Amino acid sequence: MPVATRGAAVAAMTLLLACDDEPSGPTPSTTRSADPATAVETWISIEPGSFRMGSPATEKCRDDHEKQAEISVERAFEISAHEVTQASFESLLGYNPSFRRACARCPVDSVTHHEAAAYCNALSRKNEREPCYQCTSSEAATRCEPRKETQAACKGYRLPTEIEWEYAARAGTEGATYVGAIESCMGRDATGDRIGWYKASSAGRSHPVGRTEKNDWGLHDMAGNVYEWTDTWFSPKRTDRVARGGSWYHNAHHLRSAMRNPLPPNKRLSYVGFRCVRTN
């Protein structure tokens, strides 16, 4: 069966970074010089390819809404190597919605889907690119809608589609995670300890980005730390957006590459953040 293929290109651009109950609130290459400690954001170029999305019926800890399908990614895109940090979010939008604000290098959290889209627009304007969303109001009252029927046609920064997110997270792998299976769905797990901050390892909080094992395409925190908004609706009802990747608050089975979490786009949760992409 086909597995994902990709390529990478090198360019230079500097950007400012700055129990499951829900609490409120091909060869990889780095495309941009980066270090979240020095407020420089890394972008990874992802080439078109094909992959097997979802999980097999035999995968441990799987959910019923992870049906497998062979998927083609037809457009190249670039994706941030790290989740958007609190410092980066505040530098562009002027405020920090995060539940714990004393960690500039931690991923921004407690951000709605609309606020994440507004950040992507601000990043587009900063870099003189086309905004991908039509947004009204500001901060907690922000409401954003896509400007194009096919978001991949927009050349500015935006949230990834669910397909783009899983393609990038898997980085050519077909297992439960990009380093292997999750064996302990609800407790401490050796695979989880390698790749992400989750309930058993996080000490009840998010952590600075980029401190866990990256995948083969150079992406950090695609498992754990904070769930990440995508631009995909969970169902035809269009009430919930899909969030991906697991979080510091959730058990190890949430770290699986196929895990899907439906969340209302207006919901503000201390374990939800995002990263941006841009069509090449």
Image (spheres, helix red, strand yellow):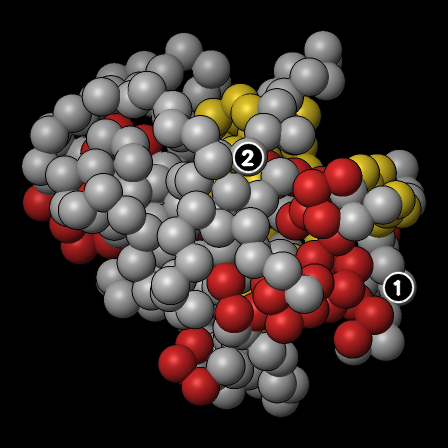
Mark 1, residue position: 130
Q: CA distance from mark 1 to mark 2?
A: 27 Å
Image position of 29 with respect to 97: above or below: below
Residue found at x 34% / y 40% = 247
Q: Quadrant of residue 280?
A: bottom right
Where is 70 relative to 125, above or below?
above
Q: Position of residue 219 (x, y in %)?
A: 42, 62
The residue indicated by pointer 2 is 268
Image position of 69 (left or right of 24): right
The amino acid sitting under disc 2 is: Arg
In the displayed structure image, the side of residue 113 where residue 200 appears, left or right: left
Q: Is residue 125 visible?
A: yes
> Is residue 47 visible to the viewer in this orientation of the structure?
no
Q: Is residue 136 above or below residue 130?
A: above
Sequence order check, earlier mark of 1 and 2: 1
Residue occupying the point 89% across, 37% down: 149
Q: How many marks?
A: 2
Residue 80 marker: none
- Coordinates of residue 127 in the picture (x, y in percent): 78, 77
Residue 122's image quarter? bottom right
Tell me: residue 167, above or below residue 261: below
**Residue 160: x %, y % from top left:** 63, 47
Mark 1: few, some, or many residues within 10 Å (few <14, many ≥20)? some
Local secondary structure at mark 2: loop
The residue carrying pointer 2 sits among few (fewer than 14), some (14 to 19) or many (20 or more) residues within 10 Å by Cα, namely many
Q: Secondary structure at mark 1?
A: loop
Q: Are marks 1 and 2 in contact (CB under 8 Å)?
A: no
